[in-house]
Every structure is written in structure tokens, then in C-alpha cells.
Image (spheres, rainbow, N blue to C red):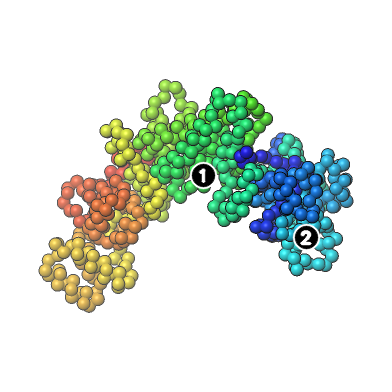
Amino acid sequence: MGNNIKQYAIGEILDGRYFYIPAYQRGYRWTEKQVGDLLRDLLSFANDSKSDEDFYCLQPIIACPITEEKKLKELFKSVYDKNLLEKGVWEIIDGQQRLTTIFLLYKYLIAKKGWNAETLKEEEDGKELYHIFYATREDSATFLESLNLDIVKGGDDFKSNIDFYHMASAFKLIDSWIKNEGKEINQRYKLGGSLETVRSSFFTLLNGMRDTKSGSVQVLWYELSENKSQSSIKEFQKINTGKIRLTDAELIKGLFLLNRNFEQSSKYIRQSTLAIEWEFIENTLHANNFWYFLQKKGTDMPNRIDLLFSLIYKIHKIKDSEEELFSDILKEADNDILDTRKSVIFRYYCDMFEGKQGEELQIAVAEAWKEVMTLFRTLDDWFYTPATYNYIGLLSQCGEDITRLIFYYDHMPENATQEDFIDYLKDRIKFYLRSIKRDEEGKIVTSYKDRKNIYRILLTLNIHLLNVQNSKLKSESDIYKFPFDVLNAQDWDIEHIDSFHTNALKKDELKREWIETARSDRKDFLSVQEQQEIDQKLENKEYDTVIDLLKKNAGETEMDEEIKNSIGNLTLLDAETNRSYGNSLFCTKRRIIIDRIKQGVFIPAATQYIFSKFYDDKGTNRSIWAKEDMESYHKYIICMLNEYLPEYNQ
């Protein structure tokens, strides 16, 4: 039997079951902050207005059932009795701290009511607080069961036993927190300052079942098959060293591949087919060239297939809304997805399959999986079409939520063409360039501080160039696809094309290094007299004078800040290349760029054009980047990107 995933309300596990904490785990160690945060969250949720069957979600519990009587006798020794088998025993691999804190809170609440175990059963429909047993700390279990306020206020600080100390501290904190913060929270909700009202809110919430209209506390219960109990230490180590996390994808995979989904027949989908297709999707998404045309630079997920389930969930959220509301709805959905306590995507699928059996369940699973495969095939088609690949990749880098693109694509009229979709993508690119300013002549007005807009302009230029080339040849070749995976791997930045200010180099060592490089690159253009003058100035350490002389020889002159920081003097370049040429003369930069291209380093097309002097219509000087070059390059950008740029007053 495989692993199983269930969803429990705390009220459902208040049935007297036993939780066994193995020896490899440390004892209870939650701090005042952790306990206080949980209490605050629970009480605020209890007091908030809720729709029917809303719940507060705890982090998942990972457990393994123990049913073998022989093993139970070995573990529980003298305290073993038949009641263990009747109530059920689970080894807790992850979740001890949460279960213990809930235990302490519930025990406190029934103590304040003056109830014992029998009263609880009578008053709360047979409920019984679960039991926690520790493999190497039998005394801890006894202490936990007998804990009350008289004990914690009796003057013993329990520091001789660290487990007792933390349990007693948490129990004591619950009491003081309810009397202070809890009371204040209730007053903010205009529920008065009665402590009984505070305790009643907690008690009602913890007793809630999954269908309780007043709300409940629920937990995802990830149950390992009993035959994996021997590897529970390994599972615990993986979880607690950060090697794995129970992501939505892992939970959903368990949900889709449950044996009961396929018991009737394979009429709708085979279990093996679903598993193979799942693996194929994961492998495809783990190729960075595929992943980074869909995701912004620096974005990743432990299980990349989570992206598909997130997209489906968000499509479901916006499907009945107006487009102007999409941004707010998608932002809210992302916040819910990031809140791991909620596991909203897993619960979306849980609700989809809830209550279904037999053929009805198999149909639901098959249809849900068909939706996943349809979405994946759409993304795959986009990836293999250079134009859609380039534009969607650009939008992803701009921060576009591709949910919007998928929704538009799925709802295009039947007679719509690929070009209609391309036009929509262009409109979305124009949206991200909408804040760019243009003067009365149509020129782009930029400030170097506005790096976001400059970056978007330059990235759009490079991607547009590829699509222009591809549209002429109608090719499906990958050479016309922008390498977004390289963009992610390299640290790209906006770089000035022309050389630095005269005072840019502060240290003599850097000045000498610059002079040596520039002199080498200009050696064929320096007269004997100039060479001698440079030698004399160097001997006198007149480095700034030599720098000016070399710049003058190269034809580079100082320009004001506005021109230097205009779009006509800016390009995209990876950090390694940028570091390799720093504040060099243009001719030096050009040589280094050409060497890097020869070495196979990716240099964006527009940057290659710059250092190849494509924008020099006269073709008179390959060694300088003058004002005329900047103006020509600026005009070229406007010509190429005019359809994406905001309109201007002509």
C-alpha cells in the first residue's frame, strides 16, 4: 500500500489516538514567540467573519501508522495495553511541535472548564484528547498528561529537565497570553473583555470538524505506508535538513495517483499513463531553456510542475471576472499560494475529488489531468514557436503573470489566428513600456536612474531583432530564440558604451593599467612624437594628462551627462565582460567584445551591432563612439520599437 494524503480537522483526531515520538527527534522546543504567533493566528481566525466551512490550516503532519502488535509492545513496553490497537498509533515523523502545542492549549481549555476526560466525552460528542508518547522520555508523556496550572505555578521552574521546562513554559504562556493579548484581540473585535469568551473561541474552533460552519483548524496528514516505517529516520532527516519539503506538487501527485482513482477500470486514464506523463512534464520544466521563458530571472520552485497547478488554480480564480480586475485577483491568489499553511492548490484538487467514488471519481481525475496536459501542450507549443517564445519570455522578464496570457489564448475566437495572439502579446509589451517618456521629436527621454525602463527597452530591442529576422525567413530554428536561461545564469546590466569621465579612475595603479591597454590599442595611430610625449609624462607620473592625450588621439571627447546617460549610449552586457573592460576606450572595448564573441560567449545582438559599428553610416571610424553614433543608435531604437513605445505629441 502506498503513501496516503488526508485532510483532518483537529476535532477529528480528538478520538484518543496515540502519537509516538521516536528517539531520533528532540523534545518539545517551541519558544514563546512561536506559541504566541499560533495563538494570535487562531484567535484572529476564530473572530474573523467567515464563509461556511472556512478553516485555519496548520503545516502538514507526516506520520506512519504502527499496527503490528509485536512492535507496539516493544515500543510501549510496560504501558502497552489493548487500548493502543483500538485507538490507533502513529509514529510522528514531522509535526511533533505543532501537535504538542495544540495538546497543551486544549488541555488548558478543558482544565479551565473544570472538566475531566469523562466530562469531555459527555459534553463534546465522545471527544478524547490524543496522547503523546516519547520513545526515550516516558516521564515526558506522564508529565504532559498530568500538567495543570497548579503545577506550573507551584514555584518549580523545571530547569533540571529541559523537556518539562519547555512544556510548562508553553502551558504557562497560554494562560498569560489569553489574559492579556487574547483579551485585547477580543476587545478589538468588539467581543468584550471576558476571558471565558476568549477561551470559548479557542475551544469551539479546535472542536470544529471539516464541515463545521463556524470554522475549524485543519491539517494535511501525509501518511507513509507502514512498510516504510524502517526508513522513517531517513525521511525525518530529509525534511529537517531542508532536502525535501511537502510541496503542493508532491501532495497533488499523491492525490492523483491514489489506487482508488483507478479501481473501476482504465477506461478513462491509466495510472501508469498518468505517472509517465507527470514525469515527462517534470523533466521538460527542469530544462532551464524551457523554464526561463516562463519565469522571471531568479525565480524557481522546488518542484517546477507546481507552476502548472498554480496556473490552473489562478485561471479558475479569474475566469468569471472582468480583465481590469485580473491584476488584483492574481496578486491575491499568489499571496494565498505562497502561504504554505493554506496549501490552497492542493485543497483545490481535494475539493474537486471530495465525495466522489467509482466511475465518477475516475472521470473527475481524468478530466483534471486532461486540463493539466492541455495547459502543458499550450506552453510547449509556445516554446517551439520562436515568435511566441520570444515575446512571452520578454513579458515574463517584465513580471507578467502568464495566467493572463493563457486565459486570453484559451478564450480567443475560433477564427483567430496566431498573428492575433502575437498582436495581443505586443499590446502587453506596450503596457510594460507605457511609462517611458518621449519628447516632441519622439526621442526617448531617459534618466540613468530609471534602470527598470532602460533595461526593458534594451531587452525588447534585442528580442524584437530576433523576431524581425525570423519573420523574414519563416523559420522555426532555435537560433532565432532569445536565450532566457543564459540571461538568468549571467548577471546582466546596463553599460555605458563610450569611455569614462576623466576623473573616473582614482588610483594611480588603475590609471597606469588603463594607459597600458589604451596605448597598445592605439599603437598604430600614435606618432613617434606622441609616443615620446607619453613616455615623458609617465616618467613624471602625469597620468591624467596621458589619459587625455590618448582619448584625444582616439577621437573621444567629454560629453555632458545628459548625452552620456541617454539611451543612445547604453547597452546590455553580462557582468563578466563588463568587468573585463571596465572604463576602457571604445576601441579597447570593441576588441574585448570581439574576442568574447570568438570564445563563444553570448553577446546580445544589439550590443554586437554597436561594437561592429553597424550604426556608423559613413563608415569612417571604427575606433570611437562619438555623438553621431549615439544619435544614430538612438534613432534605430525608436525605429525598431516604435510600435511598442508610447505615442508622443508630434
Q: Which residue is mark 1?
A: 303
The answer to whether one can see residue 24 in this image is yes
Point out residue 368 in the picture as x, y percentages from the top left corner: 56, 30
- Please say if the residues under marks 1 and 2 sit with CB atoms less than 8 Å apart: no
Point out residue 581 in the picture as x, y percentages from the top left corner: 29, 60
Measure the C-alpha gap from mark 1 to mark 2. 41 Å
Point out residue 218 in the picture as x, y percentages from the top left corner: 70, 43
Point out residue 393 in the picture as x, y percentages from the top left corner: 41, 41
Residue 270 to residue 547: above or below: above
The structure residue drawn at horizontal position 24% and vertical position 74%, both measured from the top left corner, is: 542
**Drawn side of residue 492 relative to residue 621, left or right:** right
**Drawn side of residue 117 relative to residue 268, left or right:** right
Residue furthest to the front: 70
Residue furthest to the top: 415
Q: Which residue is mark 2?
A: 139
Quadrant (top left/top right/bottom left/bottom right) for the C terminus: top left
Q: Secondary structure at mark 2?
A: helix
Observer-side mark, 1 or 2, equals: 2
